């Protein structure tokens, strides 16, 4: 089955150290633990970045991802700075659907921010995986699945 995986960038793929300026200008860059291994296991799918990164457009995001070698895993980068709309606005996701495939059932959004990554994607008809790395308590009814580490991601993708 065709799947297009949409990954949030900061704190889902790479650690967001919340420094000023675009990530590629920082002196530090790190993978989120387990993210690279998960991407290797999911490489047969189309993987994309879907980011609100206020400081980074698509070109800046590619440079930031390249700092850890993550750029090679993503065929498309969707940056709110370029799109003029941010998650959770369903138009953010509608833009992606218009760009790649109009069928929302082929997408899965993976992100660590329930309010921004999960709610907007679900409102656009996209399956969602909430990456609850910080083990936040609460109810997350719009998440189709919840993972607590990136190592859990590949088998969960297979089930969606």
Image: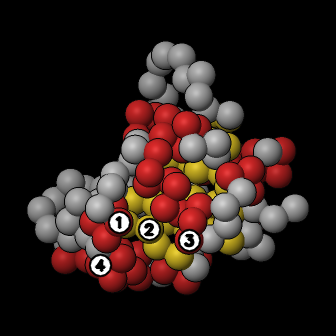
- Rendered image: mark on residue 159: none
Q: Residue at x 49, y 28 (%)?
A: 135
Q: 94 or 135, which is in the foreground?
A: 94
Does the CB distance between marks 2 and 1 fall below 8 Å? yes
State the CA–CA distance, disc 4 to disc 3: 20 Å
Nearest to N terminus: mark 4 or mark 1: 4
Q: Is residue 17 above or below residue 31?
A: above
Image quarter of the C terminus: top right
Residue 10 quadrant: bottom left
State the CA–CA distance, disc 3 to disc 2: 10 Å
Q: Residue at x 23, y 60 (%)?
A: 54
Q: Which residue is mark 4?
A: 60
Q: 126 or 140, which is in the foreground?
A: 126
In percent of width and height, residue 62 lies at 39, 80
Mark 3 lies on a secondary structure that is helix
Mark 1 surroundings: few (<14), some (14-19) or many (≥20) residues within 10 A: some
Q: Which residue is mark 3?
A: 99
State the CA–CA distance, disc 1 to disc 3: 11 Å
Q: Residue at x 39, y 59 (%)?
A: 51
Residue 67 quadrant: bottom left
- Rendered image: mark on residue 78: 2
State the CA–CA distance, disc 2 to disc 1: 7 Å
Nearest to N terminus: mark 4 or mark 2: 4
Q: Which residue is mark 1?
A: 83
Nearest to N terminus: mark 4 or mark 3: 4
Mark 4 lies on a secondary structure that is helix
Q: Seen from this angle, which residue lies furthest left? A: 20
Residue 84 quadrant: bottom left
Q: Is residue 99 above or below residue 109?
A: below
């Amino acid at each position: 089955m065709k799947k297009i995986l949409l990954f949030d960038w900061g704190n889902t793929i790479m650690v967001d150290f919340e420094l000023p300026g675009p990530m590629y200008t920082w002196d530090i860059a790190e993978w989120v633990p387990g993210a690279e291994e998960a991407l290797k296991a999911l490489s047969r799918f189309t993987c994309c970045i879907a980011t609100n990164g206020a400081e980074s457009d698509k070109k800046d995001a590619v440079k930031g991802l390249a700092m850890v070698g993550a750029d090679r895993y993503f065929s498309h980068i969707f940056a709110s700075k370029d799109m003029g709309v941010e998650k959770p606005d369903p138009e953010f996701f509608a833009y992606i659907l218009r760009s790649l495939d109009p069928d929302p059932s082929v997408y899965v959004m993976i992100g660590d921010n329930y309010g921004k990554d999960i709610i907007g994607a679900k409102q656009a008809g996209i399956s969602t995986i909430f990456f609850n790395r910080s083990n936040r308590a609460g109810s997350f009814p719009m998440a189709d699945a919840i993972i607590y580490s990136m190592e859990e991601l590949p088998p969960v993708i297979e089930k969606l």
